[in-house]
Image (tube, coloured by chain):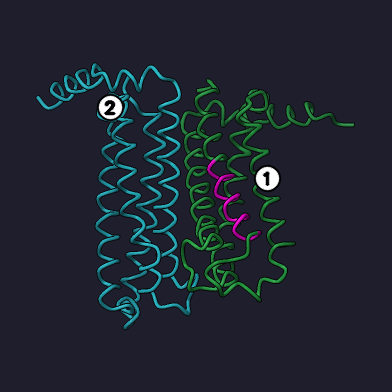
Amino acid sequence: MLTLSEFISYFEDSVLADNIRENDLLFPLIESVHVVSICLVVGSILVIDLRLLGLASIDRPVSRIVKAILPLTWSAFAVAAASGFLLFISNATKYLENGYFDAKLLLICAAGLNMAVFHGISAKDLPRWEHEAALPFPARLAGGFSILLWVAVVTCGRWIGFTMQVH
Amino acid sequence: MIGAGLNEFCNWLAATPLSHTIQTAGWIIPALQTVHILSVAVVFSSAILVDLRIWQLLERDVPLGEITRRFLPTIWPILFILLSTGSLLIIGEPRRSLLNSTFYLKMALLAVAIVLTIALQRSTSSSPNFWERNRSRRIAGRLAASVSILVWCGILFAGRWIAYTQAG
C-alpha cells in the first residue's frame, strides 16, 4: 500500500515539480494565475453571501443570483485548485509542515461544508422565502460564515508566503 | 536626474518613523497585503461580472444598466482602501515598488482600468442599453469588455510580479 509520504514524494520528485522549482518564471506565473482565480472565487461568492445577509441585491431572489454566479465561482475554484496543486508539489513536504498551509486547506473544507449545509438543509424550503430581503437565520448564518471563512483562507494564503522561505 | 532623486526619496521614506514601524513589526506587511488582496478580489470580481454580462454570459435577461448599477459603484470606495493599503506598503518598503518598473506598469494598467470603468458606468447610467442598441455598439461593448478583462488580469499579474522584480 502507498503511504501518504510516498504519494507526496511521487509528485514532489516528478519532472513537473522539478521544473516549477527550478524555472524562474514558472512559479510566479502559476502564482499569478492562483491569485486571479482566488480573487474571482472570493469576490463572486461574496455576491451570494451579501445577498444571504440581506446587504446587497435584496430585490433579487436568491436562486437567481446563485444560478448566475456559481458557475463562475466553480470554474475559478477549479483553476485555483489546479494552480494551487502545482505550487504545492513544487515543495510538498515543506508546505505540509507549514501550519498556515494546513489551516488553509482545513478552512477551504469548512467553507465547502458550510455551503453543503446551506444547500442541503437550510435551503430546502428556499422557494418560500428567497424573495424576501431579510432571510431566515440559517441562511444569514451561512452567508456570514462564508465571508469569515474565505477571509481566513486568503489570510492564511498570504501568511504562507511569509513563513515559507523557498524563493 | 530623476533616478537619483527617486533613490534619495526612497531612502528618506524608509527612514521615517512610520516606515520603521511597518518594517519592524513582522505582522503589518502580511496584514496589509491580506486587506489589499481581499479588496482586489472585490474590485476585480465586480469588473469581471460586468464584463461577462456584456458578453451575455450571465444575467442576460437583466438590462446591462442594472448590472453596472449593482456592481460598479462598489469599486470606488474599495479602490480607496486599495490606495491606502498600497501606500502603506510603499512607505514600509519604498524601494520594492518605487524603483521597480513592474510597479509603474501596474499603475499604468490601473489608470486604463479606471477610465474604462468610468466610461462603462457613465454610458449605462444615462442609457441602460447603450451597448446593445445596434451591431456596432455590441461589438464595441464586447471589445471594451475584453480589454477590461485583460487589463484587470494584467494588474493582478503585475501586482504579484512586483515581488519578483524588486531591486536589491
Label count reads: 2
Residues at marks 1 and 2 on the same chain: no
Q: Residue at x 34, y 26 (%)?
A: B166
Chain to which the residue tagged by mark 2 belongs: B
Residue farthest toward the left in the current orientation of the protein: B1
Question: On the rendered structure, is B123 left or right of B153?
Answer: left
- Relative to B92, residue B75 above or below: below
Question: On the rendered structure, is B2 left or right of B45?
Answer: left
Q: Which chain is cyan?
A: B
Label 2 SS:
helix
Find disc 2 in the rendering and name its residue. B91
Question: Of A126 and B130, which appears nearest the observer?
Answer: A126
Quadrant in which residue A10 is drawn = top right
Label 1 SS:
helix
- Relative to A4, residue B73 above or below: below
Colour assigned to chain A in the rendering is green
